[in-house]
């Protein structure tokens, strides 16, 4: 049995709907060509994916352009019309560092501290009361662990009358106006301190410079203190501070000569000389403090 060839084989068009397709035959067998159908379906799917990809790219470009336009429009403001942005202050409105005014304060100056020495350098400023009992108060003097008993005091305006050796001439020549004395004792040792007053510091300094080893203040006895250093060898010192010159004479109440080995005599004289200096300096400090307050 043979089958006729019939007419020419109709072609399958993948782009036409099924209703428009002509009948398709493969020889005398009417079974569809499944391979051809699969190939056609794959072709359609591939073209559809390409269309989707292309469309997505176009959409991305369009969105990007819209965002860029929005950014330019937001940042430009009036700039697109050629005018400066009205939201920013002009240069003249912005304060500069040089235009700001620094706070000013009224100048203040504390007065310099008063120098205590100025108040004991001349008679004009050294006006506080003075006397042997003011300069050497109390009945005894304690230096460290040593206690000296206070003896007699003396005060005279005739400075030469209370001086021995060359000191009388020194005091007179520099116009000494007053000489105060006090005696202290300790364990058979006595020391007399003499404080001479001058009108100026220059006079006191000159008197100190002119004094020599024979310029001695007269020892002061009395009030239970025996005479000392009238004929025996004694130790003396000379110094000055401000308008004051001060002298010491120290020795044994027994009349014994002082030698370099008698260290207690030396230390007694040094203690009283140091105390005299401190009392004169305190006098200046007190007057300086009073002047600063007043």
Image (cartoon, rainbow, N blue to C red):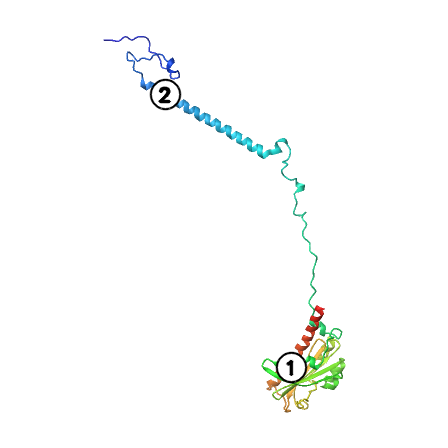
Tell me the residue at 62%/84% (across/down). Answer: 148
Q: Indicate left or right for 162 with 148 as reference.
A: right
Residue holding disc 2:
41
Q: Determine the image quadrant of residue 178.
A: bottom right
Pinpoint residue 276: horizontal percent, then vertical percent: 67, 79
Marks 2 and 1 sit apart, C-alpha to C-alpha, by 134 Å
Pinpoint residue 171: horizontal percent, then vertical percent: 74, 82
Residue holding disc 1:
272
Of residues 177 and 52, the one nearer the viewer is 52
Report crowding for label 2: few under 14, some 14 to 19, many 20 or more residues within 10 A (C-alpha): few
Location of the N terminus by quadrant is: top left
Pinpoint residue 101: horizontal percent, then vertical percent: 68, 50
Location of the C terminus by quadrant is: bottom right
- Location of residue 152 with respect to 286 vertically, above or below: below
Q: Determine the image quadrant of residue 255.
A: bottom right
Residue furthest to the left: 1
Pinpoint residue 11: horizontal percent, then vertical percent: 35, 13
Report crowding for label 1: few under 14, some 14 to 19, many 20 or more residues within 10 A (C-alpha): many
- Is the residue under label 1 in contact with that under label 2 (CB below 8 Å)? no
Q: Secondary structure at mark 1?
A: helix
Of residues 185 and 273, the one nearer the viewer is 185
Q: Secondary structure at mark 2?
A: helix
Tell me the residue at 46%/27% (across/down). Answer: 56
Tell me the residue at 71%/82% (across/down). Answer: 180
């Amino acid at each position: 049995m043979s089958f006729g060839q019939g007419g020419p084989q109709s072609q399958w068009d993948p782009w036409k709907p099924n209703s428009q397709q002509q009948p398709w035959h493969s020889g005398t067998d009417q079974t569809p060509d499944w391979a051809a159908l699969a190939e056609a379906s794959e072709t359609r799917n591939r073209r559809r994916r390409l269309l989707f990809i292309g469309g997505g790219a176009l959409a991305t470009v369009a969105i990007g352009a819209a965002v860029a336009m929005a950014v330019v429009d937001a940042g430009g403001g009036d700039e697109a019309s050629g005018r400066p942005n009205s939201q920013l202050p002009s240069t003249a409105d912005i304060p500069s560092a040089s235009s700001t005014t620094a706070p000013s304060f009224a100048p203040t100056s504390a007065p310099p501290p008063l120098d205590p020495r100025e108040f004991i350098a001349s008679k004009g400023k050294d006006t506080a009361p003075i006397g042997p009992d003011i300069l050497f108060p109390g009945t005894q003097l304690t230096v460290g662990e040593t206690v000296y008993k206070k003896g007699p005091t003396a005060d005279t305006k005739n400075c030469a009358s209370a001086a021995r050796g060359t000191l009388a001439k020194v005091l007179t020549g520099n116009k000494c106006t007053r000489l105060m004395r006090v005696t202290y004792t300790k364990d058979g040792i006595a020391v007399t301190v003499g404080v001479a007053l001058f009108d100026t510091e220059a006079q006191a300094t000159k008197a100190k410079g002119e004094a020599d080893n024979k310029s001695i203040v007269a020892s002061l006895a009395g009030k239970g203190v025996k005479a000392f250093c009238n004929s025996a060898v004694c130790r003396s010192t000379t110094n000055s501070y401000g308008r004051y010159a001060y002298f010491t004479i120290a020795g044994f109440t027994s009349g014994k000569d002082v030698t370099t080995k008698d260290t207690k005599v030396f230390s007694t004289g040094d203690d009283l000389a140091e105390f005299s200096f401190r009392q004169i300096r305190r006098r200046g400090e007190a007057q300086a403090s009073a002047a600063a307050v007043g």
